[in-house]
Image (cartoon, rainbow, N blue to C red):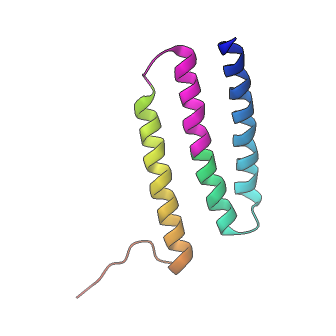
Amino acid sequence: MLETVSLIVLVLMSLAILVCTIRAIIGPSMSDRVVALDTIGINLIGFITILMLIQQTLAYSEVILVIAVLAFIGSVAIAKFIEGGVVLDRDRH
């Protein structure tokens, strides 16, 4: 029963990632694209977690952490770029 539910959840999460990918490609604004990419990262974390439950292993826990950190840093960098146009401020004296 748990395996069947897990497979259904994996299919639904795959569809959610597909829809978010479409939104990231054709999003009308940059903010929509940022939210779609952030949602893709969150869905990937959940997808990998369900795979870990199905396979009964902790082998992918580092992958989840890397995806979470990259999604956070990417969201902050893109938000800063949208706000001011510059990601890294370099003060030259």
Q: Residue furthest left?
A: 93
Residue at 58% x, 16% y is 54
Quadrant in the picture for residue 23: bottom right
Residue at 40% x, 33% y is 62
Is residue 51 left or right of 65 when viewed as pictured? right
Q: Which residues are magenta?
A: 42-59
Q: Is residue 23 above or below residue 85?
A: above
Count how many numbered circles sit on residues in the image: 0
| Quarter of the figure that contains the C terminus | bottom left
Q: Residue furthest bottom?
A: 93
**Residue situated in front as seen by the camera: 83 or 5:** 5
| Quarter of the figure that contains the N terminus | top right
Residue 83 locus on image (x, y percent): 54, 77
Quadrant in the picture for residue 18: top right
Residue 50 locus on image (x, y percent): 58, 26
Q: Residue furthest top?
A: 1
Is residue 20 left or right of 81 when viewed as pictured? right
What secondary structure do most residues of the magenta stretch adopt? helix
Is residue 72 left or right of 25 when viewed as pictured? left
Whether the magenta-drawn stretch holds residue 4 is answered as: no
Residue at 66% x, 68% y is 30
Is residue 90 left or right of 32 when viewed as pictured? left
**Residue situated in front as seen by the camera: 63 or 46:** 46
Whether the magenta-drawn stretch holds residue 51 is answered as: yes
Residue at 74% x, 23% y is 8
Residue 58 locus on image (x, y percent): 43, 22
Q: Is residue 47 above or below residue 66?
A: above
